[in-house]
Image (spheres, grey):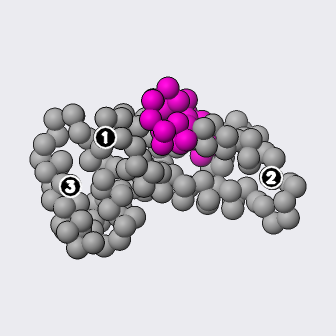
Amino acid sequence: MTTESGKRNKLEKLIAVYEHFGQEIGAIPDPWASKLAKQSKAVRGTVERTLGKEPGATRSQFAAGLEQGLRDTPDFIALISSEWRAQVAKALNCAVQTAYPEFIAKDAERLEKIRSRGRIRTDSEYYLIRHKIDVLEGTGDTGLLAELYKLADSFGSKV
């Protein structure tokens, strides 16, 4: 799934993110983390078994689905016990930074739009903020964390 020049295409980058993430969290003793690890490690096999065999299954459709899955993963991380949640969030962030850093740039743009607007509009934006909080906890960036907590708390009180 690489191009002739040796560069990985979007689908291959996304598969690599899931594989790296699954490896990183595989030993965490939490049922949701275990489920995420198992599903993440199975992505390549699912793609390879389906491409070319299912009518209409294309690389771009898989890439779009896997990218949306990455955006939804913080929803599942929220189900992990608080004892392990930050570690899993950091593992996801590390996997994305390693295999598909452009994805982080897109989310950074979304984060800045939310911050400049001063409020969260959707559940998806809330989970982006919540994921960023989990990644930043323990880093010492108390100013940004305070801002993100305020955004998350304000949205949470409206639900």
* Kind of element beneath mark 1: helix
SS label for mark 3: helix
Disc 3 to disc 1, C-alpha distance: 18 Å
> Residues under labels 1 and 2: Cα distance?
36 Å
Please state which of residues 153 and 71 is positioned toward the viewer in this rendering: 153
Quadrant housing the C terminus: bottom left
Q: Name the mark nearer the viewer: 1 or 2.
A: 1
Image location of residue 106, percent across then percent down: 43, 56
Query: Label 3 belongs to which residue?
Result: 148
In the rendered image, is residue 129 in sight?
yes
Q: Earlier in the sequence, mark 3 or mark 1?
A: 1
Q: Quadrant of the N terminus?
A: top right
- Residues rendered magenta in the picture: 13-37
132 left or right of 92 in image: left
SS for callout 2: helix
First of labels 1, 2 by sequence position: 2
Q: Mark 2 packing: few (<14 Cα in 10 Å), some, or many (20+)?
A: some
Q: Position of residue 88 (x, y in %)?
A: 41, 37
Question: Of residues 29 and 9, which is closer to you in this image?
Answer: 29
Give the residue type that dot 1 points to: Ser
Residue 94 at least partly seen: no
Q: Are marks 1 and 2 in contact (CB under 8 Å)?
A: no
Say whether disc 2 or disc 3 marks the residue closer to the N-terminus.
Answer: 2
The mark lying in front, picked from 3 and 1, is 1
Q: Residues within 10 Å of mark 3 (few under 14, many from 20)?
A: many
Find disc 1 in the rendering and name its residue.
82
Point 16% across, 35% down: residue:
140
Left or right: residue 21 compared with residue 120? right
* Residue 55 picture location, percent across and down: 85, 64
Residue named by callout 2: 50
Q: Nearer the viewer, residue 75 or 55?
A: 75
